[in-house]
Image: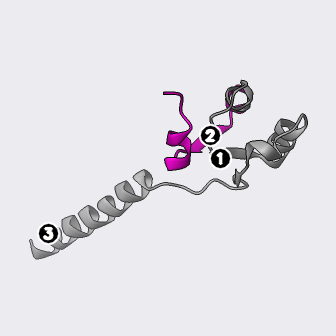
Amino acid sequence: MKGIWIAIGLILIVGIFVIAYSFSPKSVENEVNVCLHLSDYGCSTISYLIELGVKWVRTDWLVTDDSSMRDYSQNLQNNNINLLSIIDINTLIRLPH
């Protein structure tokens, strides 16, 4: 009877580790994430990002008079590249009042 309880305990322990591993985040091979500024963005930027396999771009959000920041973020989104926008006090003080 003692052997059965030990076997059940081992099965439970192994099962817990298997379940925990299945829910743990997995690293994605060849995933590239970059920091890119609007001033570095140009006509060929998106094609370079796609070629590199970039999934996330981190950038400081800029309040611009034209639609350049909106176009920049929309182009990333249209190409399945996520944008992590950094909004700090410099962004907030430039917002229209």
Task: Give me the residue at 63% from left, 38% from top.
Answer: 82
Residue at the left extreme of this rendering: 1
Residue underneath mark 3: 5
Residue underneath mark 2: 83
Pick the front one: 66 or 19: 66
As drawn, is 41 to the left or to the right of 85? Answer: right
Report which quarter residue 63 is drawn in. Answer: top right
Start and end of the magenta stretch? 73-97
Question: Which sits earlier in the primary sequence, circle 3 or circle 2?
Answer: 3
Residue 78: in magenta span: yes
Pick the front one: 6 or 34: 34
- Three-letter amino acid code at the position of disc 3: Trp
Q: CA distance from mark 3 to mark 2?
A: 52 Å
- Three-letter amino acid code at the position of disc 1: Thr
Residue 37 x, y percent position in the rendering: 73, 47
Label 3 element class: helix
Q: CA distance from mark 3 to mark 1?
A: 56 Å
Task: Give me the residue at 16% from left, 74% from top.
Answer: 3
Q: Check the image and report above or below for 7 versus 93.
A: below
What is the crowding at mark 3: few (fewer than 14 residues within 10 Å), some, or many (at least 20)? few
Residue underneath mark 1: 59
* Quadrant in which the N terminus is drawn: bottom left
Residue 52 x, y percent position in the rendering: 82, 49
Question: Which sits earlier in the primary sequence, circle 3 or circle 1?
Answer: 3
